[in-house]
Image: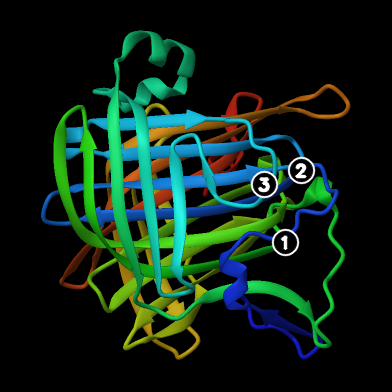
Amino acid sequence: MAKLSSEFKLRLDPEDEYTHAPGETSNYNESMYFNVFDPARMTGGWFRIGNRPNEGYAEVSVCIYLPGGQVGFAFARPEISGNAALDAGGLKIDVVEPFKRLKVSYSGKVLLLDRPFEMADPRQAYRDNPSVPCTVELDYEGVSPMYGGEVVRADGSSLPIDPEKSFSKAHYEQHCAASGAITVDGRRYEISGFGLRDKSWGPRYWQAIDWYRWCPMNFGRDFGMMLSVIGDGQGGVRQGGMVFRDGVYDLITECAIESEWDENGYQTALRSRVRTESGKTYDVTGRVLSLIPLRNRRTAADGTQLQTRITEGMTEYRCGDLVGYGLSEYLDQIIDGQPNGKALGY
């Protein structure tokens, strides 16, 4: 997150770990997201609930990366009647102690994919692959400070937001340790690893951001990063993120990402030279181990069909002699059949 001028400040309170009053904005979204990767078992996943109380449903996603390349995936839009809790579609998030301890649990089914690329056509994927029972019980511990919050004026008053162009009103992230168990189709995987979580709230359309590259990673309990490159919709980019080391966040000022692609236009590898506010530099490379392509579609008010592609890659990262794991999440708007960020060279 860029350094703010004296006219603005970041606001973040423990109460923000819980749900907020949604107001009347039709596309209000309040979501929590968690990932985890166990380097010893080569197993991990990510989990998200996004409440859309004024539209009467939640977005629920569960994605499990299994040894050998299998992926278990579930997505649903269960009905909800309010914004009292993040608990829908079998996925539940409990705040045990704000900013320190949270619980993620899931009980339901996942689509078990031997060939995760098949999710590019969800209807066919659900026809051709089995749905199997899945449970998740994970305890998350915050190991870093908090990153982000709501940008407000110096006097604490909120900034105006155009709901049609908003991705969120407020957003924060935290590197975590996680432990527990994931069971898929009767196979139990004990999990002890690291990850990153985030929380956001406010109006959201997935088409509000032109494109982005989001790369959270952990190299252990006390060293992690999050690289962020976002297209500004005018041909430029915003680079940011943070390096977590020695108990503090060192904000990133430069992290251009160079990607390698396969024949489907999915990322297979990446590299970045990272520079921070303190003047430190890091060379980071990533190799995608398993990837699932997802999408979000919406019809605009003028009848235009909008489609967003989000490719979620379990990724092995290297920084110097260290090896870590995390995610490479690439979001693109599909323009004339092509992901627009990739078409621009990103």
Q: How is the image coloured?
A: rainbow
- The numbered mark at residue 169 is 1
Residue that label 3 marks: 210
Q: Secondary structure at mark 1?
A: loop
In the rendering, at what x and y percent does residue 256 appear?
Answer: 48, 63
**Closer to the camera: disc 1 or disc 3?**
1
Give 101 or 346, whichever is nearer the viewer. 101
Sequence-earlier tag: 2 or 1: 2
**What is the distance, in whole Å, between disc 2 and disc 3 at their CAs?**
18 Å
How many residues crowd around disc 3 within 10 Å: few (fewer than 14), some, or many (20 or more)?
Answer: some
In the displayed structure, 128 sits above or below 52; it is above
In the rendering, at what x and y percent does residue 214 appear?
Answer: 48, 56
**What is the distance, in whole Å, between disc 2 and disc 1 at their CAs?**
12 Å
Q: Secondary structure at mark 2?
A: loop
Residue that label 2 marks: 27
Sequence-earlier tag: 1 or 3: 1
Q: Secondary structure at mark 3?
A: loop
Sequence-earlier tag: 2 or 3: 2
Q: Residue at x 37, y 47 (%)?
A: 105
Q: Mark yes or no: residue 262 visible.
A: no
Give 59 or 289, whichever is nearer the viewer. 59
In the rendering, at what x and y percent does residue 145 appear?
Answer: 45, 81
In the displayed structure, 20 sits above or below 297; it is below
The kind of residue on which mark 1 rests is: Lys
